[in-house]
Image (cartoon, rainbow, N blue to C red):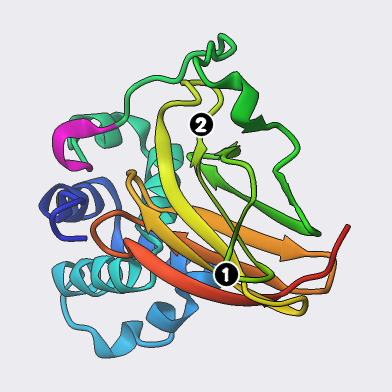
């Protein structure tokens, strides 16, 4: 993630844009930052407190939350200290509907069949699916591949690739490979009661394998 965030600019934003009392208030009012608040008396200078706060946000995947708070409470200083992402990978999203060359493979309801749904959010927007048909390998083993995409861009713009395996009638597993900034959430749920939800980032958290239970629709 150090290759992703401009941590120096974030530290400058907090140091120049907020008093120590304001940063204490942030930690007190937002439960996710409470562990930093409980240590504030033991931290010496304001600069040390900023370093502690940024380091904690970085390790706990809370940098986006920290930036949102700073932008809301001091928008002028927030704009002055940009950029906060390397290469400013924050291109504007179009509100126009996507025009896909592969629209026949899109699953607008995020339902992969066999009681399995897959989705997520990217910069606050729900992700949709492009997927192949189910295919059988071996005897009674099924697989399906595809990717998640941002519908405001195009179905061809993948954020996360996946390959789903159903080796029997009760359990399955999925390989996930990420390809997008910034950190975003991917989830899987099944009618058999499985629910998995995790953050992904193509540098910090690029891949995972999930086991789950499933049943036919």
> Is the C-beta separation of discs 1 and 2 under 8 Å?
no
Task: From this view, report whether residue 149 is shown above or below residue 21.
Answer: above
- Frontmost of labels 1 and 2 is 1
**Foreground pick, 132 / 107:** 132
Q: Locate residue 198 relative to residue 109 in the image: left or right.
A: left
Task: Tell me the residue that label 1 is attached to.
Answer: 138
Q: Residues within 10 Å of mark 1 (few under 14, many from 20)?
A: few
Mark 1 or mark 2: whose residue is earlier in sequence = 1
Query: Per the image, is 87 magenta?
Result: yes
Where is residue 32 shown, x and y percent of the image?
51, 71
The residue drawn where x is 27% and y is 90% is 42
Q: Residues within 10 Å of mark 2 (few under 14, many from 20)?
A: many
Q: Secondary structure at mark 1?
A: loop
Q: Locate residue 31 relative to residue 3 in the image: left or right.
A: right
Q: Locate residue 68 relative to residue 133 in the image: left or right.
A: left
The residue drawn where x is 63% and y is 23% is 104
Q: Main secondary structure of the magenta part?
A: helix
**Foreground pick, 26 / 162:** 162
Residue at the limit of the structure toward the bottom, as seen here: 42
Q: Over which residues does the magenta segment extend?
A: 85-89
The residue drawn where x is 56% and y is 61% is 164
Give residue 150's mark. 2
The residue drawn where x is 42% and y is 79% is 37
Where is residue 5 shown, x and y percent of the image?
20, 51
Where is residue 47 shown, x and y percent of the image?
15, 67
Q: How many marks?
A: 2
Image quadrant where one finds the N terminus: bottom left
Task: From this view, report whether residue 41 is shown above or below residue 177.
Answer: below
Give residue 73's mark. none
Image quadrant where one finds the C terminus: bottom right
Q: Secondary structure at mark 2?
A: loop
């Amino acid at each position: 993630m150090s290759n992703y965030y401009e941590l120096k600019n974030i530290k400058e934003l907090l140091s120049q844009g907020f008093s120590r009392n304001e940063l204490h208030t942030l930690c007190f009012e937002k439960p996710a930052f409470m562990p930093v608040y409980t240590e504030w008396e033991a931290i010496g200078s304001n600069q040390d407190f900023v370093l502690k706060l940024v380091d904690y946000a970085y390790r706990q995947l809370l940098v986006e939350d920290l930036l949102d708070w700073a932008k809301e409470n001091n928008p002028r200083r927030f704009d002055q200290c940009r950029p906060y992402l390397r290469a400013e990978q924050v291109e504007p999203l179009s509100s126009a509907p996507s025009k896909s060359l592969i629209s026949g493979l899109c699953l607008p309801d995020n339902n992969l069949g066999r009681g399995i749904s897959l989705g997520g959010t990217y910069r606050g927007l729900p992700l949709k699916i492009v997927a192949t048909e189910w295919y059988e390998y071996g005897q009674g083993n099924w697989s399906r591949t595809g990717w998640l995409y941002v519908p405001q861009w195009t179905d061809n713009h993948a954020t996360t690739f996946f390959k789903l395996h159903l080796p029997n009638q009760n359990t399955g597993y999925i390989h996930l490979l990420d390809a997008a900034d910034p950190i975003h959430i991917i989830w899987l749920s099944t009618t058999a009661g499985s629910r998995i939800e995790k953050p992904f980032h193509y540098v910090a958290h690029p891949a995972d394998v999930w086991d789950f239970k499933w049943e036919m629709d």
